[in-house]
Amino acid sequence: MAARQISLLKAFGSLLLGAAIGFVGVLLHNAFPPFGIILAILTIAVGINFAGQLFGFRKYKIISAVAWIAVALRAGSYGQSHEILIISNTNGNIFLLGGLLVATIFALKKV
């Protein structure tokens, strides 16, 4: 495979990993208080750090963080039938703001 194709595959894998991290965090943040929010934030930190170790560069950690942000923002906005997965309670606010902080810190940290 050419180097460009491998780079695109790594970017796509990083995107999928970030989306999976976001999905797991959305499911965990309101479950089993207060352990769910702690597990959700830890999942973000470990997952984004893992993306950097798996794919080797900081840019893939940033792609994972952006994918996490996209999933979290979509889950925090109203859908077609007015459902919302991240509600504006303490856990939801901690998940969005704390997760954004953790995702930014771990995405910009050196590999």
Image (spheres, rainbow, N blue to C red):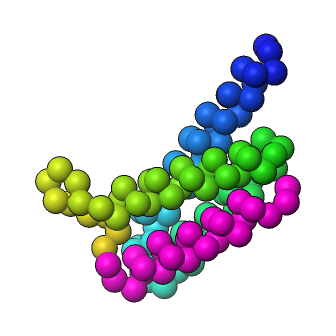
Quadrant location of the N terminus?
Answer: top right
Q: Position of residue 68 (x, y in %)?
A: 53, 55
Considering only vertical position in the picture, is 87 above or below 60? below
Q: Position of residue 108 (x, y in %)?
A: 75, 62
Q: Main secondary structure of the magenta part?
A: helix
| Residue found at the far left of this picture | 81
Please indicate whether residue 94 sits to the left or right of residue 14 in the image.
left
Image quadrant where residue 79 sits: bottom left
What residue is rendered at 81% in x and 46% in y? 57
Image quadrant where residue 65 sits: bottom right
What residue is rendered at 30% in x and 62% in y? 77
Residue 39 appears in view: no
Considering only vertical position in the picture, is 51 above or below 100? above
Q: Is 63 part of what is drawn in magenta?
A: no
What residue is rendered at 46% in x and 67% in y? 28
Q: In front here: 107 or 50?
A: 107
Q: Position of residue 45 (x, y in %)?
A: 67, 66
Q: Position of residue 41 (x, y in %)?
A: 58, 72
The part of the chain drawn in magenta is: 88-111
Please indicate whether residue 20 sits to the left or right of residue 14 in the image.
left
Q: Is 94 part of what is drawn in magenta?
A: yes
Residue 28 appears in view: yes
Quadrant location of the C terminus?
Answer: bottom right
